[in-house]
Image (spheres, rainbow, N blue to C red):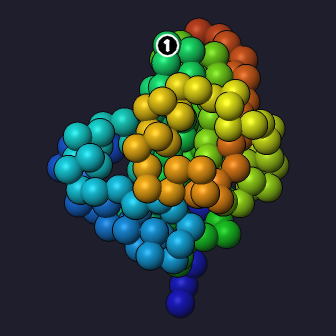
Amino acid sequence: MTRTPSHEVLIREAQPGEAVDIHALIEARGLEGHLLARDLPEVTLHATRFLVATADDRIVACGELAPLSPSLAEIRSLVVAARYQGLGIGRRLTSELRRKARLDGFSRICAFAHQPAYFARMGFSIVPHGWLPEKIGLDCVTCPLFRHCGQVAMLDDLQPIGKSHARGALAHA
């Protein structure tokens, strides 16, 4: 099995027609028990909120930036295909999602994780779920795993991005 170096992977905004491929990545990771399930109609509805990483014209990773309030966005469904794990692609996606959140005017970003150390290494802090009532009200209360999902709430305050850094970062390899 050959691994593709991180610099050969392009991160870009997802296209609406890529929802099936994004959903397949999420489903594969969900079957491993590391990610909450998402149905295809929901992923299709929100496909343009995803960033994807591509290698050899295939989607190998994805992550969604979901607005929860005017000031708070959530990183959802951050997935890297098994063959591409350990290459820094998830870190790059997270960095681009944070950048996009700042550009979109969000001042805070959160994630709910089964492996909080991953996000902690990128500056997120573990917080009580109650600190994120926007998430609880929009998603958690209707989830069948509410109050026993095993996910840890993570939060980071975003620094405003300067206009000189606002253009062109997604196209980098």
Does residue 139 sit above or below 70 in this rendering? below
- Going 49% across and 13% down the picture, which residue do you hit? 70
- Going 53% across and 33% down the picture, which residue do you hit? 135
* Amino acid beneath label 1: Pro
Image location (x, y in percent) of residue 96: 56, 37
Helix, strand or loop under label 1: loop
- Going 35% across and 56% down the picture, which residue do you hit? 38
Does residue 51 sit above or below 105 in this rendering? below
In the rendered image, which quarter is residue 27 located in? bottom left
- Going 56% across and 22% down the picture, which residue do you hit? 72
Question: Do we see residue 17 in this rendering?
Answer: yes
Q: Which of 49 and 112 is in front in this view?
A: 112
Does residue 23 sit above or below 1 in this rendering? above
Does residue 100 sit above or below 5 in this rendering? above
Image location (x, y in percent) of residue 130: 68, 31
Taking the image as shown, residue 76 lies to the left or right of residue 126, namely: left
Image location (x, y in percent) of residue 109: 62, 29
Q: Nearer the viewer, residue 95 or 4?
A: 95
In the rendered image, which quarter is residue 49 located in? top left
Residue furthest to the bottom: 1
Q: Label 1: which residue?
A: 70
Residue furthest to the top: 163
Taking the image as shown, residue 141 lies to the left or right of residue 44, namely: right
Image location (x, y in percent) of residue 88: 66, 59
Q: Nearer the viewer, residue 169 or 160?
A: 160
Taking the image as shown, residue 150 lies to the left or right of residue 11, namely: right
Callout 1 crowding tier (Cα within 10 Å): few <14, some 14–19, many ≥20: few
